[in-house]
Image: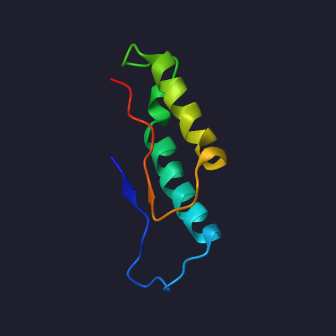
Amino acid sequence: MSIDLTDNLDPETVPDEWWLERMRLHRDELLAASDWTQVADDPTGNAAAWATYRQQLRDAPASWTPASTWTPPALPS
């Protein structure tokens, strides 16, 4: 799943810093949405996979090349 980071109010040339900030905002939403997987009584029974997923999200800005789309890591099954 690729996330479109464009906005209909964007200028013709978007600075890389804007793409990075937008990607981080989406990344932060995904981290917040998966916070529940890190409680001691994790109902998924797959805490290690969720921890790896969350680490990949935290590492994403360092390895991502700014662009108009971002593909986050796949959710654990």
**Height in image: 43 above or below 25?**
above
Q: Report the number of discs.
A: 0
Q: Residue 15: give x, y in percent of width and height.
A: 61, 75
Q: Nearer the viewer, residue 13 or 53?
A: 13
In the rendered structure, the answer to whether residue 7 lies left or right of residue 39 reads: left
The image quarter containing residue 58 is top right
In the rendered structure, the answer to whether residue 71 lies left or right of residue 39 reads: left
Q: Residue 49: give x, y in percent of width and height.
A: 46, 20
Q: Residue at x 59, y 32 (%)?
A: 55
Q: Residue 28: give x, y in percent of width and height.
A: 53, 50
In the rendered structure, the answer to whether residue 20 lies left or right of residue 74 reads: right
The image quarter containing residue 18 is bottom right
Query: Which quarter of the rendered picture does the C terminus lie within?
Result: top left
Colour approach in the figure: rainbow
Q: Residue at x 51, y 62 (%)?
A: 67
Residue 38 visible in this rendered orientation of the protein: no
Q: Residue 16: give x, y in percent of width and height.
A: 62, 68
Q: Nearer the viewer, residue 4 or 13?
A: 13
Residue 59 visible in this rendered orientation of the protein: yes
State the residue lying farthest toward the top: 45
Q: Residue at x 51, y 49 (%)?
A: 27
**Height in image: 66 above or below 77?**
below
Q: Residue at x 46, y 65 (%)?
A: 68
